[in-house]
Image (cartoon, helix red, strand yellow):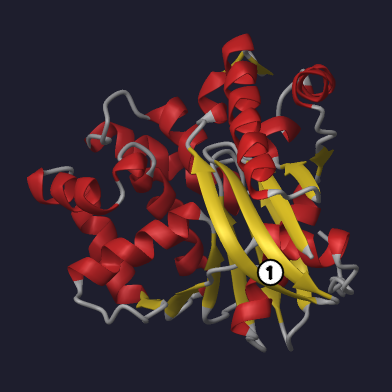
Amino acid sequence: MKQAIIDIGSNSMRLTVYETDGKAFRPLFREKVMAGLAGYVEKGALSPEGLERAVAGLREFKSTAETLGINNMAVFATASLRNISNTKEALAAIKEATGYAVDLISGREEALYGYAGAMVELGLSQGAFVDIGGASTEIASFSPGEPVSGLSFGIGSLSLYRDCVKKILPGHDALKKLRRVIETEIDSQSLFEFLPRTPLACVGGTSRAVLKLAGKLYSLPPECRRVTAEQLSGLCALLCKGDRAALDLILKLEPDRIHTIVPGILILQHICGLFGAKEIVVSKYGVREGYLCAKVLGNNMPTPKTES
């Protein structure tokens, strides 16, 4: 059976089509729209233009699914529609315009789905997990092979860019502000214990972009999914210079993230440091695969031993 999943994120909207057989799945097709919905939040509400962007992306995905003859479709949203004041109105407008009833998942669910999706591929027994989105960041720690705690933070690569950066790449003052906001938001969450854990399992567009950029900078083999803490630090230092070398690297490999990659990698580096992780490992799977397993295929989801 073919099953389509649409993820309405704060930076990108993604359609993934899977071949499913019982509890197993295999990705067949992916499509992405860089809607940048977090950039259309005005006074806490998603603007009419932002809503139009969301609807346009969903209509594009719907057309693709119809062309492929796919009838099984599940649509969910994360912080893109969760962290706005007009959530109810936006969901109703989307359903009226597209026919899709959007499943709005909580920050805790997003962290668990992301973790579960990553573990389908990685199967790590211990470490920590991070998913850096456009408007939120989810973190979980796990040992032995089960999530111990998880939390969602209200900062992401696109929301940070909008709040802290005036130019395409941040200058000296913007970098100071970015680091200050990241530390304030994450370090102030006393309910979450950042115990030493490695590796740091990563999902999401920011992490995949970091892997691609590090691969080019350090000549890593194409099949490599790991970046050491030292390599991450070196890449971050290069990107924060904002010079021609940094611009060329981003524009050649991740032009869609020219404005969000620096805020995103600063979040990633900070979290890596808090856990004392020696390396990051980037999964091809994430929240969509976790959602597919839990909500569509009915696989058992891991339950945290403690909640935060």
Q: In this view, does 307 lie to the left or right of 283?
A: right
In the image, what residue occupies the spot 79% across and 65% down? 1
Q: In this view, does 181 lie above or below 68?
A: above
Residue 243 visible in this rendered orientation of the protein: yes
Q: Is residue 73 left or right of residue 194?
A: right
Q: Nearer the viewer, residue 102 or 79?
A: 102
Q: Name the residue under label 1.
A: 117
In the image, what residue occupies the spot 53% across and 48% down? 31
Q: Residue 201: where, in percent of width, then height?
A: 55, 73
Q: Name the quadrant containing residue 123.
A: bottom right
Is label 1 in a helix, a strand or a loop?
helix
Q: Which of 20 and 202 is in front in this view?
A: 20
Q: Nearer the viewer, residue 130 or 2?
A: 2
Instruction: State the quadrant of the C terminus.
Output: bottom right
In the image, what residue occupies the spot 51% across and 66% down? 274
Q: In this view, does 51 lie above or below 4?
A: above
Q: In this view, does 137 lie above or below 168?
A: below
Q: In this view, does 86 lie above or below 19?
A: above
Q: In this view, does 54 lie to the left or right of 169?
A: right
